[in-house]
Image (spheres, grey):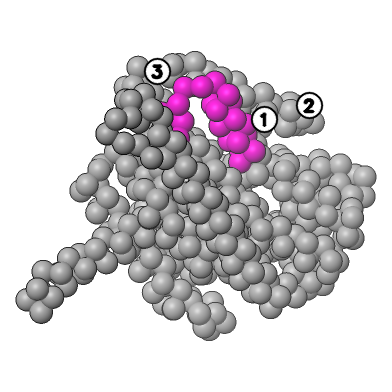
Amino acid sequence: MVTAHTSPVLAARADNSTTAQSSRIASAIASRQLLLMVLVALILRLAVMAFQYPEQLNPVRDHFRFGFEMGRVARSLVQGKGFANPLFGETGPTAWMPPLFPSLLAGVFKIFGVYTKASALVMLSINCLASALNCIPVYFMARKSFGPRLAFWSGWGWALFPYGVYFPSEMIWPTTLTTLELSIVFMLALYLAENDRAFGWILYGLCWAVAALTDPAAVSVLPFISLWACFRLFRGRKRWLLCAAVSSLAFLLAVSPWIVRNYVVFHQFIPFRDGLGLELRVGNSEDTSLLTNNKQLGPCCNAAAWEEFKREGELNFMAKKQREALDFIGTHRALFLKTTVRRVIYVWTSFWSWDYARLGDEPLDKPNIFFCTSFTILALIGFRRAWQFDPASVIPYALVLFSYPLVYYVTHNDMRYRRPIDPMMVVLAVVAIAAWWQQKALRRAGSPKSA
């Protein structure tokens, strides 16, 4: 016990000991909470997966539904034909997609069989695990920005978030891994904005490389959030230039083998993938009736385009589609502007048209429009509330929400494309709910009946 006669040194030691013990207890509680979040999230996702996995086993078009182009390249790797053949025949080496997800899928195929039920269950379980583990960076990004209480509810918000539960088992595709990776680099940026240790920034660069080699769309966030973090270091008179240099070097060294491979194989510079021209073309045509892209312009769904792909080769085909897209945009500027506005609306509301044919086959589209729109509004309310109290805390969230969808505004979109920024929006939605709950509690406390 510390008494009035205890020396100041002993009193300070006692206070430090108490503080350290409280910190350990809080850390232990937080660890248990995180473990419970992850376990509940994983159980929910696996339960949904049990109903959805048969969709991956559809044998139509030689099991193309199982991973689509990713599955084809994975099969080619298992067959010893290299990173190649992304469609329906042996068309040679490809740079249609970056290497990490097809390589992961190839490893699963190697062990559990190509296009088998076991491989589908394993891949979807990996998706579910990645989504469940995302509770951890969501918790820590919210803790850094808004404190432990909102971190707790944000973690649970992600564990129970409907899109986070449904989409991991909806398709074998990199979306869920990209969501986890983007959450991790975002969380790291929040903490590294106050830390100029080189090791942390090297790790940051390597994590960005992993994200880029999984889904290059994530790289659209990199310059914005990294410049923000470096600016924070600059304002704090810390070694921002060194941090920027070592993270950039780590990133470039990690992605360079893939870039070198593409140059050696195709004799031209291809940073991550060569499919931008096709993506631009299928999203910009006269036919805007069917959601946000005209799949009939691509070799996956059009026999003539497939023959053209085989005849001209992948790079020539992609370059031709890019020229067609730019020509179309140049001669249909009003339509391009209108379609771009519709794509922007679709990203944040999931609304494209009440008339498109898919409504007849997708009875949940209308409820999804309501949920997606409500979720966006809630996140915007949370952003406004946080801005009123501490603008600096929400600037990085604004940077991500602004930059990530940009490429989809001008190419084409799909419901799953926005998923990687959902964790940041969940945090902002929790801020909105917490502010509303606090105001409600204050009104109750100030009412005459309460008094």
Extreme residue in the left direction:
448
Answer with mark 3 or mark 1, whichever residue precedes in sequence.
3
**Vertical placement of residue 69 versus 201, above or below:** below
- Viewer-closest of 107 and 235: 235
Q: Position of 376 compared to 182: left or right?
A: left
- Dominant SS of magenta comes to helix
Q: Is mark 2 on a helix, strand or loop?
A: helix
Q: Position of 32 compared to 272: left or right?
A: left
The reply to whether residue 268 is in sight is no
* Type of the residue with mark 3: Lys
| Residue 408 on image: x %, y % | 48, 51
**Magenta segment, which residues?**
190-212
Q: Residue at x 32, y 44 (%)?
A: 394
**Vertical placement of residue 146 versus 341, above or below:** above
- Viewer-closest of 37 and 90: 37
- Viewer-closest of 138 and 398: 138
Place residue 428 in its image quadrant: bottom left
* Circle 3 residue: 238
**Vertical placement of residue 389 versus 42, above or below:** above
The total number of labels drawn is 3
* Circle 2 residue: 264
| Between marks 2 and 1 in the image, the one whose residue lies nearer the viewer | 1
Image quadrant occupied by the N terminus:
top left
* Type of the residue with mark 1: Val
242 drawn magenta: no
Q: Position of 76 compared to 102: left or right?
A: right
* Circle 1 residue: 255
Label 3 environment density (alpha carbons within 10 Å; few <14, some 14–19, many ≥20): some
